[in-house]
Image (cartoon, rainbow, N blue to C red):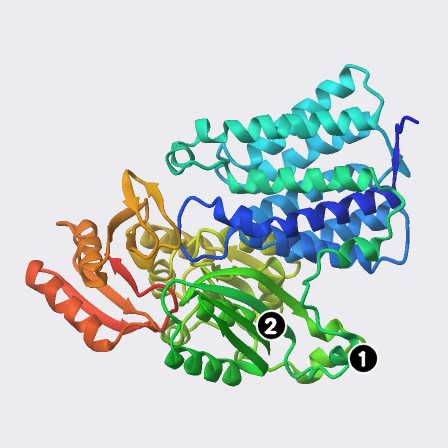
């Protein structure tokens, strides 16, 4: 029997199936990312975004379309992480703006919803780039309109043809972005959207599925039994578990150090070594820090983060037990600063420069829009400047600003920590908001940043062949140096950054580098460039051995 309309119950099932599908493919989607760096990747960001919405959908008591649309939109907008997550949330926001006004939707309404979704997503990105998730979404919307205008009424055909078109457009993304073609991959965000659509189709074909049963299939195989869950110490809010595929031999000293770290950061730690695979499981309030430490030893798989305070009997525990993230001045201010930072040294620098709230996060765990909103709520100022310090966090910061009422929130689009430091240094308390925005934007445009990390897989970028385990010096516009020797890669990167316009080089060394090693780098830079000043500071950042700025 043909199906020509979809009601709220079926959209709910389709959405949850789509969420489950995306979650199950997140590691594969992560592997499609062009840069082989140990970052918070596309699959992870899209999954955490959509699971935030899925949580609200599961908690719905009403079955009407308006309530469902609000849950999907609000949950995804607030839970959005990374650029891909923000774009996904905007696609869902636009889609639900149309369907919320109907008890049942047919193909013409769905076509309009697809078009609104694409319009919302494109507007959220300052400089939309083709060959990305945006292009795949646009291709799907064009096909939806084509089918609606052709008088197609049967939804099975409609859904199948849209997914087929999305896959065709996805396959063309390497022709639109040369960096994708060189790396031999399609766009990871576009792939994530296709997997969501495929999951939604599975939900369409299973309209009577139990929603709790749908999501239970997406949970980890090693889920804690109910009796264990009831014993959870709600002092720590997140059970964080993953497996590490070790890039080197995981010796006994590493194991002891990791266990000690887990004991210090949380409770109920597990660190089990089985050959080149290490299983990690811990209760903590800082899942991002656990993930960052794990990335030091290799690639991560099977990442699971569960909010245990939502477990039975733990409601209300958050307010009683969660520690203060930062010291927030209670007295009113004209201006306030929120900055994203990772590493004790980096955070101390921002605090010393007057930052009011520091959000822990960065490459390996992009803060969500919700994290930004919580920080905005805590800073008692009329105008709040947000420094994302990462190009993959800017959209989430902008989204938080757009969702804030009663405070003037200004996002300074800092793409790196050195840009953030320069930005806050150039702030003048007596100047107007507009003058400060202009001055800070002008200042960050003069900052060149280089970051040294390691490759998590083989690839080719910027005509440079990269092997897993190689050190990489990454500049503002691409790879500056690659090699097997950390010191040489760092020095080569700095050489590429320095020219006659540069007068100061600042070297921030990470948690895996000693001060002596950093000073040795500084001495070599001075021997080659005697006319510039070189500063060395402890950043304490994980994963990135050195972060270097040249101004």
- In this view, the residue in front, 102 or 48, is 48
Residue assigned mark 1: 313
Q: Quadrant of residue 159?
A: top right
Q: Quadrant of the C terminus?
A: bottom left
Q: Is residue 418 above or below residue 121?
A: below
Dot label at residue 60: none
Residue assigned mark 2: 378
Q: Is residue 307 above or below residue 72?
A: below
53 left or right of 283 in image: right
Q: x, y (%) of residue 27?
A: 55, 52
C-alpha span from label 1 to label 2: 28 Å
112 left or right of 522 in image: right
Q: Quadrant of residue 107?
A: top right
Q: Residues within 10 Å of mark 1 (few under 14, many from 20)?
A: few
Secondary element at tag 2 = helix
110 left or right of 470 in image: right
Q: Quadrant of the N terminus?
A: top right
On the question of residue 419 being in view, the answer is yes
For the point 77% across and 40% down, which residue is it?
A: 202
Q: Is residue 169 above or below residue 326?
A: above
For the point 77% across and 14% down, which residue is it?
A: 150
- In this view, the residue in front, 416 or 427, is 416
């Amino acid at each position: 029997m043909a199906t020509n309309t979809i009601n709220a119950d079926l959209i709910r099932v389709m959405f949850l199936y789509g969420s489950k599908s995306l979650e199950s493919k997140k590691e594969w989607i992560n592997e499609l990312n062009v840069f082989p760096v140990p970052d918070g990747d596309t699959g992870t960001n899209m999954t955490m975004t959509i699971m935030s919405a899925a949580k609200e959908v599961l908690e719905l008591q009403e079955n009407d379309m308006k309530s469902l649309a609000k849950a999907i939109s609000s949950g995804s907008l607030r839970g959005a992480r990374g650029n891909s997550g923000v774009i996904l949330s905007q696609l869902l926001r636009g889609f639900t703006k149309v369907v919320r006004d109907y008890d049942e939707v047919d193909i013409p309404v769905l076509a309009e919803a697809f078009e609104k979704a694409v319009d919302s997503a494109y507007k959220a990105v300052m400089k939309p780039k083709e060959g990305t998730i945006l292009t795949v979404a646009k291709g799907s919307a064009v096909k939806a309109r084509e089918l609606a205008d052709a008088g197609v009424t049967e939804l099975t055909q409609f859904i199948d043809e849209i997914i087929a078109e999305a896959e065709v457009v996805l396959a063309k993304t390497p022709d639109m972005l040369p960096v994708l073609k060189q790396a031999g991959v399609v766009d990871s965000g576009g792939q994530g959207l296709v997997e969501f659509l495929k999951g939604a189709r599975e939900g369409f074909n299973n309209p009577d599925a139990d929603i709790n049963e749908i999501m239970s299939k997406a949970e980890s195989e090693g889920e804690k039994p109910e009796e264990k869950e009831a014993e959870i110490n709600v002092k720590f809010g997140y059970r964080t578990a993953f497996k590490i595929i070790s890039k080197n031999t995981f010796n006994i000293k590493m194991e002891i150090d990791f266990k000690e770290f887990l004991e210090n950061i949380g409770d109920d730690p597990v660190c089990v070594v089985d050959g080149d695979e290490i299983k990690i499981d811990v209760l903590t309030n800082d899942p991002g820090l656990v993930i960052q430490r794990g990335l030091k030893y290799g690639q991560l798989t099977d990442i699971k983060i569960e909010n245990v305070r939502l477990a039975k009997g733990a409601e209300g525990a958050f307010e009683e037990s969660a520690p203060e993230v930062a010291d927030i001045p209670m007295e009113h201010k004209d201006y306030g600063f929120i900055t994203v930072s990772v590493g004790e040294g980096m955070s101390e620098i921002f605090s010393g420069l007057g930052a009011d709230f520091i959000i822990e996060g960065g490459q390996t765990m992009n803060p969500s829009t919700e994290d930004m909103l919580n920080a905005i709520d805590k800073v008692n100022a009329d105008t709040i400047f947000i420094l994302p310090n990462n190009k993959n966090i800017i959209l989430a910061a902008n989204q938080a600003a757009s969702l804030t009422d009663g405070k003037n929130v200004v996002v300074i689009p800092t793409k790196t920590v050195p840009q953030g430091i320069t930005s806050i240094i150039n702030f003048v308390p007596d100047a107007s908001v507009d003058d400060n925005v202009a001055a800070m934007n002008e200042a960050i445009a003069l900052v060149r940043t280089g970051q040294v990390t390691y490759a998590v897989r083989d690839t080719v970028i910027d005509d440079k062949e990269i092997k897993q385990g190689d050190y990489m010096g990454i500049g503002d516009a691409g790879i500056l140096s690659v090699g097997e020797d950390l010191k040489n890669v760092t020095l080569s990167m700095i050489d590429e950054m320095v020219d006659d316009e540069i007068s100061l080089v600042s070297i921030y060394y990470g948690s895996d580098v000693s001060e002596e090693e950093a000073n040795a780098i500084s001495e070599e830079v001075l021997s080659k460039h005697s006319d510039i000043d070189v500063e060395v500071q402890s950043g304490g950042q994980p994963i990135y051995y050195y972060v270097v700025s040249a101004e």
